[in-house]
Image (cartoon, rainbow, N blue to C red):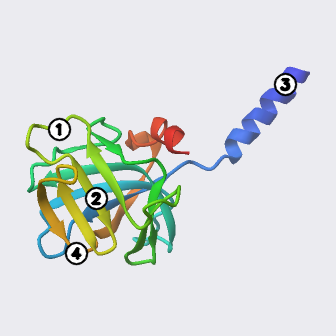
Amino acid sequence: MKKVVVVILLSMSLINCPAQAGILWNWVNSSGTGTEEGTFVTLGTFENGLVEAGSYELVDFTVSSSGSNLPVGSISGGQYSMGQPGVGFVWDGSSPTEFWRADGTYTNGFAFYVVDPAEDAPNRIAMSIDYFVVDILYSTVFISESTTVVVSPESTISPVNSDSFGALKAIYR
């Protein structure tokens, strides 16, 4: 009898669990040049082409194309690492208004690092409000702009169609 009750309760709890979903966001270094492009993955809901205003923590980051020789890749694919866990941005319903770090240091910005950079190639991409840079950490600068990256929500993603969930969520939560 106890086994039946446990199985029923477990089944009911699984039925009531909401499916985990996230948002795939596109980013581009500026609306004028647009030489660096990629995506962010955050937890959240994307409905009818809209994302509610709020704060969104990144669970993955990608570079999909680069005019400055950044490698195409992602955190989940092992090509990039975060400067620190717990980064995200505040979305006002149409654009980012703040980039943040969970620990509060160096607020309004974050960076991603190339795990295995080529010699003399960029190894860091950093962004915040009115700031975007691709460089060899604090030395050779490939791109330096006083602009905010253009961010736009693209679609809903789920654990079924994304490598970004699971291990990354466990690391950054």
Labels 1 and 4: the sequence-earlier one: 1
* Mark 2 → mark 1, Cα distance in angstroms: 16 Å
Q: Which residue is mark 3?
A: 4
Callout 3, which amino acid? Val
For the residues labelled 4 and 3, the Cα–Cα distance comes to 63 Å
State the separation of the CA atoms marked 4 and 2.
12 Å
Q: Position of residue 86 (x, y in %)?
A: 49, 52
Q: Do labels 2 and 1 touch, CB within 8 Å? A: no
**Relative to 33, residue 3 above or below:** above
Q: Identify the secondary structure beneath mark 4.
A: loop
Q: Can you tell which mark lies on residue 38?
A: none
Q: Which residue is mark 4?
A: 146
Q: Are marks 3 and 1 in contact (CB under 8 Å)?
A: no
Amino acid tagged 1? Pro
Label 4 crowd bin: few (<14), some (14–19), many (20+), radius 10 Å: few
Q: CA distance from mark 3 to mark 2?
A: 54 Å
Please state, as top left, top right, bottom left or bottom right, where the N terminus lies in the image: top right
